[in-house]
Image (cartoon, rainbow, N blue to C red):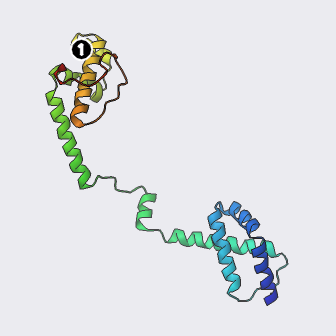
């Protein structure tokens, strides 16, 4: 193609840029990749070199841009970082850092202290319900008390532990008679 043919391709690229980008984005699945490919197509046309006779200039431009996008995609895949590879293989280290380990140990010690302050029955009810997952009706049978009493004991235990850890406990069960702030002497 002659220099005037190269000018014709550049003009076509400028005048039909949005339409070319839309068509290319459909094929590539990304407007951003389509825009980048068309920019590189423009640079290729500016760079010179021989271009033979082009009977259909618009499909020719689309083919150049599409090939450029495919080569870029292959190049990007080939230059994967070690972190990318680990993430792709799901080998990311999820172990907590030393600061989080120290925080967890401190919180665990605070929980142990809060549990130690509970009466034995309250502590057992809390652990049976929340750690062992035993239904409240079974806990009531185990201790020979009503399910309502189990709920009251459990709520009191949770409120105490929440208060000791500086956390708010959201009520999701049980009687509404204990609404309000936790009283330390309710043990």
Q: Quadrant of the C terminus?
A: top left
Side (left or right) of 28 relative to 158: right
Q: Residues within 10 Å of mark 1 (few under 14, many from 20)?
A: few
Please state the horizontal and vertical placement of residue 171, each as a whole percent of the image: 35, 25
Identify the residue position indicated by label 1 in the image: 142
Rendered position, 168 above or below 28: above
Secondary element at tag 1: helix
Residue 67 appears in the figure: no
Please report the residue visible at 49 percent of the width from the left and 71 percent of the height from the top: 79
Identify the residue at image location x=34%, y=17%.
176
Between 82 and 182, the one nearer to me in the picture:
182
Query: Of residues 8 and 93, which is closer to you in this image?
Result: 8
- For residue 65, side relative to residue 137 (left or right): right
* Quarter of the N terminus within the rendering: bottom right
Q: Is residue 69 left or right of residue 175?
A: right
Q: Residue 58: where, in percent of width, then height? A: 80, 73
158, 75: nearer the viewer: 158
Q: Is residue 42 at all visible to an observer of this figure?
A: yes
Report the number of discs. Answer: 1
Q: Is residue 78 above or below residue 138?
A: below
Residue in view at x 62 percent, y 65 percent: 32
Q: Quadrant of residue 51?
A: bottom right
The image quarter containing residue 59 is: bottom right
Residue 55 falls in which quadrant of the image?
A: bottom right
In screen coordinates, is 106 left or right of 68?
A: left
On screen, 84 above or below 12? above
């Amino acid at each position: 193609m002659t220099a005037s043919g190269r000018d014709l391709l550049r003009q076509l690229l400028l005048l039909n840029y949005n339409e070319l980008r839309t068509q290319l984005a459909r094929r590539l699945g990304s407007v951003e990749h389509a825009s980048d490919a068309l920019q590189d197509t423009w640079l290729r046309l500016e760079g010179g070199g021989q271009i033979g006779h082009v009977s259909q200039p618009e499909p020719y431009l689309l083919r150049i841009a599409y090939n450029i996008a495919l080569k870029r995609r292959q190049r990007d895949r080939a230059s994967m970082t070690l972190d990318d590879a680990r993430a792709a293989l799901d080998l990311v280290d999820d172990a907590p850092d030393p600061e989080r380990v120290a925080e967890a140990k401190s919180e665990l010690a605070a929980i142990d202290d809060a549990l130690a302050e509970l009466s034995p029955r309250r502590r057992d009810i809390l652990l049976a319900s929340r750690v062992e997952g035993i239904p409240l009706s079974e806990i009531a049978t185990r201790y020979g008390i009503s399910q309502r009493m189990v709920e009251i004991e459990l709520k009191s235990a949770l409120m105490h532990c929440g208060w000791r850890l500086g956390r708010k406990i959201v009520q999701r069960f049980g009687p509404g008679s204990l609404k309000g702030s936790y009283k330390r002497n309710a043990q």
